[in-house]
C-alpha cells in the first residue's frame, strides 16, 4: 500500500497499550479506531494516542471502510470468533496469543484465512524478541544446535488481575495462553516438529477453575527436548525465563534481553531495528500487508502449536 495502513485496535488493556506504544514508532501506520468494553477508559486511552473513533463494539469498527487491518488484544475466549469476523469483513488481522482455546476454532480460522487472501497473524511474540532472534540466527547459520530448552513461566496470580493490577473480565490459562509461547518457540527454533508431548497439572483452583501449576515435556523430531514449568503460585520474579542448552553454547533469554550461561549479558541491540519485541511483531504484520506475503507467525504456521496443546489437554482430561 502506498497510503498509510489504517488500523483498528481492540482491547485497551495492558497489552493493547504495549501495541499502541510500539505502533507510534512505525511509519506509514495510523490507529484510527479503538475498541474496548469500558467506554470512558477507552476514550481516555484514545485521547492519549490521538485516536479519533471509539466504540465498545468491534462490529462498529469493522464497518469503517477506511480500516485496513485489526489488532485484537481481547480476552482469550473471544480470539477465534473475532478473528473470523475480521477476515469475513475483509480486514487483515493480527490476534494476540492464543489463537484459540479450542482446537476446532483455530482450525476454522486457518481455513478461512487461507481462502481470504488476507494477512492473518498470531502474536507469538517470542519469535520476534531480539534475544530469541539472536539464537535463531545462530541456528540458521549452523553455529548452534539446541539439545534442550529449559523454560520457567512464573507469575503470582491468586486473584484474577491483569499486568496492570486491574481486575480481569476473563480467566487466563497456563496451557492455552502461556504454554503456547514456549510450545511454538521450541518447534520454531529447532526447525523441527514436536513429535512427543507429556504433561501433568496441579490442583484446580476452587474459584478460578484452572490449574495453577503445570509441567510439560516436549520432544522434537530432530531429538531436541524441552522442559517447561508453569505456575501462577510463584512468589518471586515474574515472567518467562528460557535456557537454551546447545552443542556450542548456553543462552538465557529474558524477553528482549539475552545472557550466556554464566549470566554475562550479550549485546542484541544490532539484531533488529528495535529492542522491543512487540514493536517488531507489529512491524512484521504491517510489512506482510505491504508486501502481500505470509507473515512470520501466520495463523497457518502456528496452528501445529495448538494441535500439541489440544493433545495435552486431552491428557489432563483423560
Image (spheres, rainbow, N blue to C red):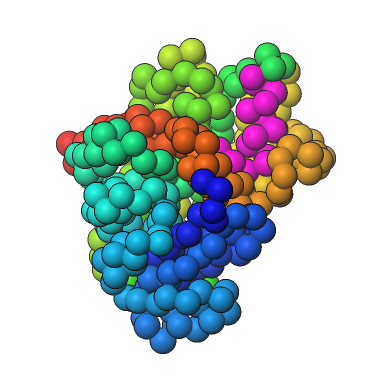
The residue sitting at 47% across, 77% down in the picture is 52
Instruction: Give the vertical position of 74 relative to 3 (above or below).
Output: below
* Residue 38 position within the rendered picture, expressed as x and y whole percent measured from the top left: 36, 81
Nearer to me, 149 or 68: 68
Instruction: Give the vertical position of 253 relative to 227 (above or below).
Output: below
Q: Quadrant of residue 249?
A: top right
Instruction: Give the vertical position of 259 relative to 80 (above or below).
Output: above
Check the picture and name the quadrant holding the C terminus: top left
Which span of residues is magenta-colored? Answer: 124-140
* Residue 254 position within the rendered picture, expressed as x and y whole percent measured from the top left: 65, 46
Instruction: Give the vertical position of 98 relative to 7 (above or below).
Output: above
The residue sitting at 34% across, 46% down in the picture is 99
- Residue 110 appears in the figure: no
213 on left or right of 31: left
* Residue 314 position within the rendered picture, expressed as x and y whole percent measured from the top left: 21, 36
Nearer to me, 120 or 224: 120
Q: Is residue 66 magenta?
A: no
Q: Quadrant of residue 193?
A: top left
- Residue 194 appears in the figure: yes
The residue sitting at 78% across, 43% down in the picture is 269
| Residue at the extreme bottom of the image, as rendered | 40
Magenta region's main secondary structure? Answer: helix
* Residue 272 position within the rendered picture, expressed as x and y whole percent measured from the top left: 71, 40
Amino acid at each position: 500500500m502506498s497510503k498509510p495502513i489504517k488500523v483498528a485496535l481492540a482491547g485497551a488493556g495492558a497489552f493493547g497499550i504495549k501495541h499502541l506504544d510500539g505502533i507510534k514508532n512505525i511509519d506509514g501506520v495510523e490507529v484510527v479506531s479503538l475498541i474496548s468494553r469500558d467506554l470512558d477508559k477507552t476514550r481516555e486511552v484514545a485521547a492519549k494516542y490521538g485516536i479519533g473513533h471509539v466504540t465498545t463494539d468491534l462490529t462498529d469498527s469493522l464497518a469503517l471502510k477506511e480500516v485496513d487491518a485489526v489488532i485484537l488484544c481481547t480476552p482469550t475466549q473471544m480470539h477465534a470468533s473475532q478473528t473470523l469476523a475480521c477476515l469475513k469483513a475483509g480486514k487483515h488481522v493480527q490476534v494476540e496469543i492464543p489463537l484459540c482455546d479450542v482446537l476446532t476454532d483455530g482450525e476454522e480460522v486457518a481455513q478461512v484465512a487461507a481462502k481470504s487472501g488476507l494477512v492473518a497473524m498470531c502474536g507469538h511474540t517470542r519469535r520476534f524478541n531480539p534475544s530469541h532472534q539472536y539464537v535463531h540466527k545462530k541456528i540458521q547459520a549452523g553455529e548452534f544446535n539446541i539439545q534442550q530448552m529449559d523454560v520457567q513461566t512464573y507469575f503470582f496470580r491468586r486473584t484474577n488481575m491483569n499486568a496492570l493490577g486491574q481486575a480481569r473480565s476473563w480467566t487466563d490459562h497456563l496451557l492455552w495462553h502461556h504454554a503456547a509461547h514456549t510450545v511454538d518457540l521450541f518447534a520454531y527454533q529447532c526447525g523441527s516438529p514436536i513429535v512427543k508431548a507429556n504433561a501433568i497439572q496441579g490442583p484446580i483452583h476452587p474459584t478460578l477453575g484452572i490449574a495453577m501449576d503445570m509441567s510439560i515435556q516436549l520432544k522434537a523430531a530432530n531429538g531436541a527436548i524441552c522442559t517447561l514449568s508453569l505456575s501462577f503460585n510463584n512468589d518471586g520474579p515474574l515472567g518467562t525465563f528460557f535456557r537454551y542448552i546447545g552443542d556450542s553454547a548456553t543462552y538465557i533469554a529474558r524477553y528482549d534481553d539475552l545472557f550466556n550461561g554464566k549470566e554475562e549479558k550479550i549485546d542484541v541491540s544490532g539484531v533488529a531495528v528495535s529492542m522491543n519485541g512487540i514493536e517488531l511483531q507489529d512491524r512484521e504484520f504491517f510489512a506482510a500487508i505491504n508486501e502481500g506475503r505470509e507473515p512470520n507467525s501466520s495463523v497457518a504456521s502456528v496452528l501445529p502449536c495448538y494441535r500439541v496443546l489440544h493433545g495435552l489437554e486431552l491428557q489432563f482430561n483423560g
